[in-house]
Amino acid sequence: MEQLMSYWYDWGVFVGVFLAAAVAIYIFFDSQQAVAPGSATWPRVISVAGLLLTLPSLVYRLTQMEDAEVLGLPFLFEGDSNFSLFFYLAVAGLLLALGALVYYLMRVRTVAAVVIVDPFPTVPPPPPPPPSEPIAPQPRPVAATQPVNPEPPPQAWLVVRSGPRVGTQFGLGVSRPNVVGRDPNKADIIIDEESVSREHARVRFENGQFVIYDMASTSGTLVNGNAVQRQMLYDNDRINLGRVELVYKKV
Protein backbone atom coordinates (compact mmCIF):
# COMPACT_ATOMS: atom_id res chain seq x y z
CA MET A 1 0.00 0.00 0.00
CA GLU A 2 2.88 2.39 0.82
CA GLN A 3 4.35 1.70 -2.61
CA LEU A 4 1.00 2.47 -4.27
CA MET A 5 0.73 5.73 -2.32
CA SER A 6 4.28 6.57 -3.35
CA TYR A 7 3.35 6.17 -7.02
CA TRP A 8 0.18 8.22 -6.51
CA TYR A 9 1.88 11.19 -4.83
CA ASP A 10 4.81 11.02 -7.25
CA TRP A 11 2.93 11.40 -10.56
CA GLY A 12 -0.35 9.50 -10.32
CA VAL A 13 -2.23 12.38 -8.66
CA PHE A 14 -1.77 14.54 -11.77
CA VAL A 15 -2.99 11.78 -14.10
CA GLY A 16 -5.94 10.97 -11.83
CA VAL A 17 -7.14 14.58 -11.53
CA PHE A 18 -6.73 15.05 -15.29
CA LEU A 19 -8.83 11.94 -16.05
CA ALA A 20 -11.58 12.94 -13.59
CA ALA A 21 -11.72 16.46 -15.04
CA ALA A 22 -11.76 15.15 -18.62
CA VAL A 23 -14.68 12.82 -17.81
CA ALA A 24 -16.70 15.59 -16.15
CA ILE A 25 -16.09 18.04 -19.01
CA TYR A 26 -16.91 15.43 -21.70
CA ILE A 27 -20.19 14.38 -20.06
CA PHE A 28 -21.27 17.99 -19.49
CA PHE A 29 -20.67 19.27 -23.03
CA ASP A 30 -21.66 16.09 -24.90
CA SER A 31 -24.98 15.86 -23.07
CA GLN A 32 -25.86 19.44 -24.11
CA GLN A 33 -26.44 18.29 -27.71
CA ALA A 34 -26.76 14.50 -27.68
CA VAL A 35 -29.41 13.65 -25.07
CA ALA A 36 -32.78 14.73 -23.86
CA PRO A 37 -32.85 17.39 -21.12
CA GLY A 38 -32.60 15.94 -17.63
CA SER A 39 -31.57 12.43 -18.68
CA ALA A 40 -27.84 13.10 -18.02
CA THR A 41 -28.29 14.79 -14.63
CA TRP A 42 -26.97 11.90 -12.54
CA PRO A 43 -23.85 11.23 -14.67
CA ARG A 44 -23.02 14.94 -14.48
CA VAL A 45 -23.43 15.07 -10.68
CA ILE A 46 -21.44 11.86 -10.09
CA SER A 47 -18.57 12.90 -12.39
CA VAL A 48 -18.28 16.32 -10.72
CA ALA A 49 -18.36 14.67 -7.28
CA GLY A 50 -15.57 12.32 -8.36
CA LEU A 51 -13.49 15.26 -9.59
CA LEU A 52 -13.96 17.09 -6.28
CA LEU A 53 -12.81 14.03 -4.31
CA THR A 54 -9.50 13.95 -6.21
CA LEU A 55 -8.66 17.60 -5.54
CA PRO A 56 -7.58 17.33 -1.84
CA SER A 57 -4.72 14.95 -2.74
CA LEU A 58 -3.60 17.33 -5.52
CA VAL A 59 -3.58 20.28 -3.10
CA TYR A 60 -1.73 18.14 -0.55
CA ARG A 61 0.83 17.11 -3.18
CA LEU A 62 1.48 20.72 -4.20
CA THR A 63 1.57 22.27 -0.72
CA GLN A 64 2.56 19.63 1.85
CA MET A 65 5.00 17.31 0.12
CA GLU A 66 8.19 19.37 0.61
CA ASP A 67 9.11 17.15 3.58
CA ALA A 68 8.73 13.93 1.60
CA GLU A 69 12.32 13.99 0.32
CA VAL A 70 13.75 14.73 3.80
CA LEU A 71 11.56 12.56 6.05
CA GLY A 72 10.58 9.89 3.52
CA LEU A 73 7.10 8.64 2.55
CA PRO A 74 6.94 5.98 5.34
CA PHE A 75 7.35 8.74 7.92
CA LEU A 76 4.53 10.76 6.35
CA PHE A 77 2.34 7.66 6.14
CA GLU A 78 2.69 7.06 9.88
CA GLY A 79 2.72 10.66 11.09
CA ASP A 80 0.12 12.41 8.91
CA SER A 81 -3.40 10.96 8.71
CA ASN A 82 -4.28 13.25 5.78
CA PHE A 83 -1.64 11.52 3.68
CA SER A 84 -3.62 8.27 3.49
CA LEU A 85 -7.08 9.88 3.82
CA PHE A 86 -6.64 12.04 0.73
CA PHE A 87 -5.27 9.05 -1.18
CA TYR A 88 -8.38 6.95 -0.45
CA LEU A 89 -10.67 9.88 -1.32
CA ALA A 90 -8.85 10.37 -4.63
CA VAL A 91 -9.16 6.67 -5.55
CA ALA A 92 -12.88 6.75 -4.71
CA GLY A 93 -13.33 9.93 -6.74
CA LEU A 94 -11.54 8.49 -9.77
CA LEU A 95 -13.70 5.35 -9.63
CA LEU A 96 -16.85 7.50 -9.38
CA ALA A 97 -15.85 9.54 -12.43
CA LEU A 98 -15.07 6.44 -14.51
CA GLY A 99 -18.31 4.79 -13.36
CA ALA A 100 -20.27 7.90 -14.39
CA LEU A 101 -18.61 7.78 -17.83
CA VAL A 102 -19.47 4.08 -18.33
CA TYR A 103 -23.09 4.66 -17.24
CA TYR A 104 -23.41 7.70 -19.52
CA LEU A 105 -22.04 5.89 -22.58
CA MET A 106 -23.97 2.62 -22.05
CA ARG A 107 -27.33 3.93 -20.83
CA VAL A 108 -27.92 7.63 -21.48
CA ARG A 109 -25.94 8.12 -24.72
CA THR A 110 -27.23 4.88 -26.29
CA VAL A 111 -30.89 5.73 -25.62
CA ALA A 112 -30.41 9.22 -27.04
CA ALA A 113 -28.99 7.95 -30.36
CA VAL A 114 -32.39 7.85 -32.08
CA VAL A 115 -32.82 9.04 -35.64
CA ILE A 116 -35.94 11.14 -36.15
CA VAL A 117 -37.94 10.05 -39.17
CA ASP A 118 -38.71 12.87 -41.56
CA PRO A 119 -42.52 13.24 -41.46
CA PHE A 120 -42.55 14.88 -44.89
CA PRO A 121 -40.68 12.60 -47.32
CA THR A 122 -40.16 13.83 -50.85
CA VAL A 123 -42.82 12.50 -53.20
CA PRO A 124 -41.64 11.72 -56.76
CA PRO A 125 -43.49 13.56 -59.54
CA PRO A 126 -46.30 11.61 -61.26
CA PRO A 127 -45.59 10.00 -64.65
CA PRO A 128 -46.60 11.96 -67.76
CA PRO A 129 -50.15 11.25 -69.02
CA PRO A 130 -50.59 9.01 -72.08
CA PRO A 131 -51.34 10.60 -75.47
CA SER A 132 -54.90 11.85 -75.66
CA GLU A 133 -57.36 10.00 -77.89
CA PRO A 134 -60.92 10.83 -78.92
CA ILE A 135 -63.26 9.69 -76.19
CA ALA A 136 -66.93 9.00 -76.65
CA PRO A 137 -69.26 11.18 -74.57
CA GLN A 138 -69.99 9.63 -71.20
CA PRO A 139 -72.83 10.41 -68.85
CA ARG A 140 -71.79 12.82 -66.13
CA PRO A 141 -71.34 10.95 -62.84
CA VAL A 142 -73.22 12.12 -59.82
CA ALA A 143 -70.88 13.76 -57.34
CA ALA A 144 -70.50 11.95 -54.05
CA THR A 145 -72.03 13.61 -51.03
CA GLN A 146 -69.42 15.57 -49.09
CA PRO A 147 -69.66 16.58 -45.43
CA VAL A 148 -70.64 20.19 -44.82
CA ASN A 149 -67.49 20.96 -42.80
CA PRO A 150 -64.80 18.44 -43.75
CA GLU A 151 -61.78 18.13 -41.43
CA PRO A 152 -58.87 20.04 -43.01
CA PRO A 153 -55.56 18.23 -43.40
CA PRO A 154 -53.15 18.33 -40.46
CA GLN A 155 -51.29 21.61 -40.07
CA ALA A 156 -48.58 20.14 -37.83
CA TRP A 157 -47.26 16.82 -36.54
CA LEU A 158 -45.95 15.30 -33.32
CA VAL A 159 -43.13 12.82 -34.02
CA VAL A 160 -42.08 10.29 -31.34
CA ARG A 161 -38.35 10.72 -30.71
CA SER A 162 -37.93 8.44 -27.67
CA GLY A 163 -40.26 5.97 -25.98
CA PRO A 164 -42.74 3.49 -27.49
CA ARG A 165 -43.15 3.51 -31.30
CA VAL A 166 -40.15 5.74 -32.11
CA GLY A 167 -40.67 7.56 -35.41
CA THR A 168 -44.49 7.44 -35.26
CA GLN A 169 -46.17 10.63 -36.58
CA PHE A 170 -49.40 12.06 -35.12
CA GLY A 171 -51.24 14.71 -37.14
CA LEU A 172 -52.67 17.70 -35.26
CA GLY A 173 -56.13 18.80 -36.37
CA VAL A 174 -57.29 22.41 -36.08
CA SER A 175 -60.87 21.57 -35.06
CA ARG A 176 -60.32 18.81 -32.47
CA PRO A 177 -58.83 19.00 -28.96
CA ASN A 178 -55.76 16.79 -29.75
CA VAL A 179 -55.63 15.25 -26.27
CA VAL A 180 -52.37 13.32 -25.67
CA GLY A 181 -52.46 10.53 -23.09
CA ARG A 182 -52.43 6.85 -22.20
CA ASP A 183 -56.21 6.22 -22.06
CA PRO A 184 -57.57 5.16 -25.49
CA ASN A 185 -61.10 6.19 -24.43
CA LYS A 186 -60.12 9.78 -23.64
CA ALA A 187 -57.06 10.62 -25.74
CA ASP A 188 -56.91 11.46 -29.45
CA ILE A 189 -53.15 10.75 -29.52
CA ILE A 190 -52.52 7.54 -27.57
CA ILE A 191 -49.06 6.90 -26.04
CA ASP A 192 -48.94 3.58 -24.19
CA GLU A 193 -46.25 4.37 -21.58
CA GLU A 194 -46.76 4.20 -17.81
CA SER A 195 -45.05 7.54 -17.15
CA VAL A 196 -47.68 9.28 -19.36
CA SER A 197 -50.95 10.23 -17.62
CA ARG A 198 -54.34 9.09 -18.93
CA GLU A 199 -55.01 12.65 -20.12
CA HIS A 200 -51.55 14.22 -20.03
CA ALA A 201 -51.69 17.27 -22.32
CA ARG A 202 -53.87 18.99 -24.94
CA VAL A 203 -52.70 20.74 -28.13
CA ARG A 204 -55.17 23.37 -29.38
CA PHE A 205 -55.15 25.54 -32.48
CA GLU A 206 -55.49 29.17 -31.39
CA ASN A 207 -55.15 32.24 -33.61
CA GLY A 208 -53.18 30.41 -36.27
CA GLN A 209 -50.78 28.72 -33.84
CA PHE A 210 -50.79 25.44 -31.88
CA VAL A 211 -50.64 25.83 -28.09
CA ILE A 212 -49.95 22.98 -25.62
CA TYR A 213 -51.68 22.77 -22.21
CA ASP A 214 -50.71 20.50 -19.33
CA MET A 215 -53.83 18.69 -18.00
CA ALA A 216 -52.72 18.34 -14.36
CA SER A 217 -50.51 15.40 -15.30
CA THR A 218 -48.49 13.48 -12.72
CA SER A 219 -45.04 13.99 -14.26
CA GLY A 220 -45.73 17.38 -15.85
CA THR A 221 -45.25 18.69 -19.39
CA LEU A 222 -41.85 20.04 -20.50
CA VAL A 223 -41.12 22.09 -23.62
CA ASN A 224 -37.41 22.34 -24.44
CA GLY A 225 -36.61 21.27 -20.88
CA ASN A 226 -38.90 23.79 -19.14
CA ALA A 227 -42.04 22.78 -17.23
CA VAL A 228 -45.10 24.56 -18.67
CA GLN A 229 -48.82 24.88 -18.07
CA ARG A 230 -49.50 26.68 -21.37
CA GLN A 231 -46.93 27.16 -24.11
CA MET A 232 -47.07 28.21 -27.77
CA LEU A 233 -45.28 25.69 -29.98
CA TYR A 234 -42.69 26.41 -32.66
CA ASP A 235 -41.09 24.17 -35.26
CA ASN A 236 -38.68 21.54 -33.81
CA ASP A 237 -39.75 22.18 -30.20
CA ARG A 238 -38.99 19.17 -27.95
CA ILE A 239 -41.91 18.05 -25.75
CA ASN A 240 -41.31 15.66 -22.82
CA LEU A 241 -44.27 13.76 -21.34
CA GLY A 242 -42.85 11.51 -18.63
CA ARG A 243 -40.17 9.37 -20.27
CA VAL A 244 -41.51 10.02 -23.79
CA GLU A 245 -40.08 12.78 -26.00
CA LEU A 246 -41.98 14.21 -28.98
CA VAL A 247 -40.81 16.71 -31.61
CA TYR A 248 -43.25 19.32 -32.95
CA LYS A 249 -43.10 19.65 -36.74
CA LYS A 250 -45.02 22.40 -38.51
CA VAL A 251 -46.20 22.07 -42.09
Image (cartoon, rainbow, N blue to C red):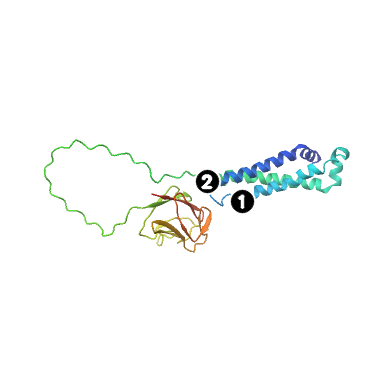
The outermost residue toward the right is: 71
- Tally of numbered discs: 2
**Residue extending farthest top:** 131
**Label 2 element class:** helix
Q: Position of residue 131 (x, y in %)?
A: 19, 35
| Quarter of image, res 68 | top right
Quarter of the figure that contains the N terminus: top right
Tag 1: amino acid: Trp
Residue 229 relative to residue 101: left or right: left
Neighbor class of circle 1 (other Cα within 10 Å; few <14, some 14-19, many 20+) is some
Residue 5 visible in the shown view: yes
Task: From the image, tell me which residue sits under label 2.
Answer: 112
Q: Are marks 2 and 1 in contact (CB under 8 Å)?
A: no
Picture residue at 57% right of the left edge, 46% below the top: 31
At which x and y percent is residue 107?
A: 57, 46
Q: Is residue 196 above or below residue 49?
A: below
Q: Which mark is residue 220?
A: none
How far is mark 2 from mark 1, CA to CA?
15 Å
Front one among 180 and 123: 123
Give the residue furthest to the front: 207
User: Type of residue at label 2?
Assistant: Ala
- Residue 181 visible to an observer of this rendering: no
Numbered circle sitting on residue 42: 1
Residue, far left: 136
Q: Earlier in the sequence, mark 2 or mark 1?
A: 1
Give the crowd class for mark 2: few <14, some 14-19, many >=20 residues within 10 Å.
some
Give the percent coordinates (x, y) of residue 148. 26, 60
Corner quadrant of residue 147: bottom left
User: Could you say whether the residue bearing mark 1 is in a helix, strand or loop?
Assistant: helix
The percent position of residue 198, horizontal first and vertical second, equals 46, 61
